Amino acid sequence: MLNEKVQHLWNKELSQCSYEEIYLAIQQLCKEKMQALPLVQGKRKLYYISAEFLIGRLLTCNLINLGIYQQVAQEMEQAGKSMALLEDAEPEPSLGNGGLGRLAACFLDSIATLQLRGDGVGLCYHYGLFQQKFHDNKQWEQPNPWLQPNSWLTKENITFTVPFGKFTVEGELYSIDIPGCDTNSKNRLRLFDLKSVQENIVQDGIQFDKEDIRQNLTLFLYPDDSDQAGRLLRVYQQYFMVSCAAQLILKELEEAGHAPTELAEYAVVQINDTHPSMIIPELIRLLMEKGVGFTEATDIVSRTCAYTNHTILAEALEKWPISSLEIVAPRIVAIIRELDRLAKEAYPQKGLGIIEDGLVHMARMDIHYGFSVNGVAQLHTEILEQSELKNFFEIYPEKFNNKTNGITFRRWITACNPWLDEFVTKKLGQGWKQDANLLEGLEKFEDEESLSRLLEIKQTCKEQLAEYVLHQQGIELDTNSIFDIQIKRLHEYKRQQMNLLYIIWKYQQIKGGKIPPRPITFLFGAKAAPAYILAKDIIHALLCMAKVIENDPQVSPWLKLVFVENYNVTKAEKLIPAADISEQISLASKEASGTGNMKLMLNGAITLGTLDGANVEIAQRVGEDNIYLFGKKSPEVIGLYESRGYCSREYYQRPEIEPLVDFLLQKPMLAQGDAECLGRLYQDLTHKDWFMTLLDLEEYIEVKEKAFADYENRTEWAKKMLHNIAQAGFFSSDRTIAQYEQDIWKLKSI
Ligand code: 26V
């Protein structure tokens, strides 16, 4: 198959081709196969609208889903070519920030695999999220030019006009085919781009003229919104996305021969966080243009739209000034004002209106004018119902529901850890690929041979990662050491700084002569938002600490801190299979769900975490012997915020904690870093510490020590690994999507 393709394309043998040539040949092969697949059919269609789809590289997963991976791999082997080097020929699209965008990508895979008729709709950012570079122990941002002449995108012959306040633009539609796994059918990811965008206006990293909307609109994902022009650009992006999406939905409805008034019967719109919320007034506006009255249009749209909340962080809940909407999308302002008036008329209590103090509360619009509101883990949904959105839960209890997140096992075990995939399949047969709950069948394989094979697989993955890190960053990893991994966006609430304080503690212990039984490698991967100063300070402190350890011959044989540059999906695929310990240490109540926790568990890492997000459900499943829990629980934390009862200074003054925090400003650190950045982090921890790092620090140290000690009993540790893998089935996104289908979308049942 591949041999013929390269012969035809390049007129030479596979063994003579470069990896770029082979990559293009396989991409073409996949595209042809996908083009030939029929679309999933069904009466009603889902539109999953999202500002982010963090799809990652597509080659391996497409080959798997199309059922031709083995054949291609065999031909490659016969020609003496490596699959790993082949994968590296593909640039990674970076159309997402983190969890929310990656979740959307996992969902597309599961929706297609369950043969539900549903497309993703979003934006085609030319440079996506920035590329991260380290220089002077600091993060620098560069554009990520992932769009190449040959990409997975197919240009459609469809454009829509989007009317902004002072001018109009043309949105052009591109599609990426999403094949189901072994289904012989596909859905699509629909991405809109702006014709007039100019890549050459970007200078000096990721700087560009934020006011030139016609030239900049789809250049970057979430451009820095720390200033007024940046915030306005984000509103422009959002309105552009939803206007194109709404026009596409109504066009497809009409083409299928249905009336605009039948929208809710034939379409369902899932609003992924509040970025696409303006689809509600936009659909109402377009229905009215087609002659439907306001009241009926509002009723139809309310029966079509469902909203997912992904965060309770106040600063992340979007509120746009009505004055900005007047500039960007004046045609929907009157509609939003009327929706607000009706909401306030029906529910005059304070805090329920859509417009307050000149700000449009996007989530409130979704809740009043959508038929479903869901959180993304049990605890998160409970917090929404009992505190954050309590007033709304009281008036609309029937709208609220939980859908605990999941991950696609096709990418997060089959593609990234073929050894583990083979191990599981040998034990259980192929059935677990259809029904992930069957993984529980692994529980009984506690025999010596199975356990030692599990340890061997982990070792292989660690060696694979070591090779990769050496090649990428020139850093050597000791594969005999414990791999302790924290990979996720950098945010104070995720508390990478707490991990840093542990490392400082361990450093001081070793200086004091307390040598651990074996070396430990701390691996981090994280990008900080370009305008998030404290997050950048934490990266700086970690990079400085890495150097401090490296330069200290007394400590360096025992500790290593590696910050993997430019953490992305590709790097996650290498890091996750190699992890021994999965750091999930957010302040309880702050992490809506987490999904990295699930990927790491599935790959046999043991969680060290707080009872936050989906960690709670992981703990319920694996039991307390197979997870390391610590820290204050969510009700206590919520209580502390309410009573303003947390004072970081009190904790700082404890003799166990003071020397750790003080180390940030001592000579070894100052010799590596920038006193201003380190000083700011020190000041924050000692005077503010909004996410209560010091509150949980001592218990964190204690429990982490226990985990490292337990690691030395290799057989018992392997059992923990086995139990974690066996209990991971619930976290398959196939389960999550089946629940969305059953409770919200009902694509098949009508
Ligand atoms: C957004 C922003 C934007 C402005 C500044 C700070 C900030 C902080 C957080 C966010 C969160 C955006 C929403 C998000 O990505 N949520 C993540 O969604 C995942 C999928 O549901 C979930 O697993 C993560 O726990 C949640 O953080």
Image: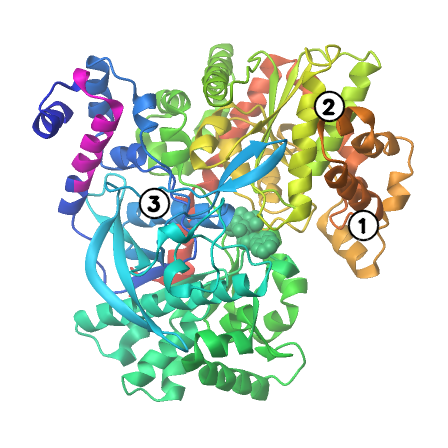
| Image vertical order of residue 169 relative to residue 417, above or below | below
Q: CA distance from mark 2 to mark 3?
A: 38 Å
Question: What stretch of residues is rendered in magenta?
Answer: 15-31
Circle 2 residues within 10 Å: few <14, some 14–19, many ≥20:
few
Task: Identify the residue position indicated by label 2 in the image.
Answer: 706
**Circle 2: residue type:** Lys
Q: As shown in the figure, which amino acid type bears the numbered disc 1?
A: Lys
At 50% across and 45% down in the image, what residue appears?
98
Q: Is residue 727 at all visible to an observer of this figure?
A: no
Q: Residue 444: horizontal and vertical position, in percent? A: 49, 22
Residue marked by disc 1: 688
Circles 1, 3 touching at the beta carbon (< 8 Å): no
What separation in Å lies between label 1 and label 3 (alpha carbons)? 42 Å
Mark 3 packing: few (<14 Cα in 10 Å), some, or many (20+)? many
Judge: label 1 CB < 8 Å from ligand 1. Answer: no
User: Mark 3 or mark 1, which is nearer the start of the sequence?
Assistant: 3
Q: Secondary structure at mark 1?
A: loop
**Residue 519 in magenta stretch:** no
- What residue do we see at 34% from left, 45% from top? 109
Residue 130 visible in the shown view: yes
Residue 676: percent from left, percent from top: 75, 40
Residue under label 3: 109
Most common secondary structure along the magenta stretch = helix
Cα gap from disc 1 to disc 2, whole angstroms: 29 Å
Q: Quadrant of the C terminus?
A: bottom left
Q: Is residue 732 left or right of residue 562?
A: left
Q: Position of residue 77 (x, y in %)?
A: 24, 15
Residue 736 vs residue 475, the one in the foreground: 475
The quarter of the picture where the N terminus appears is: top left
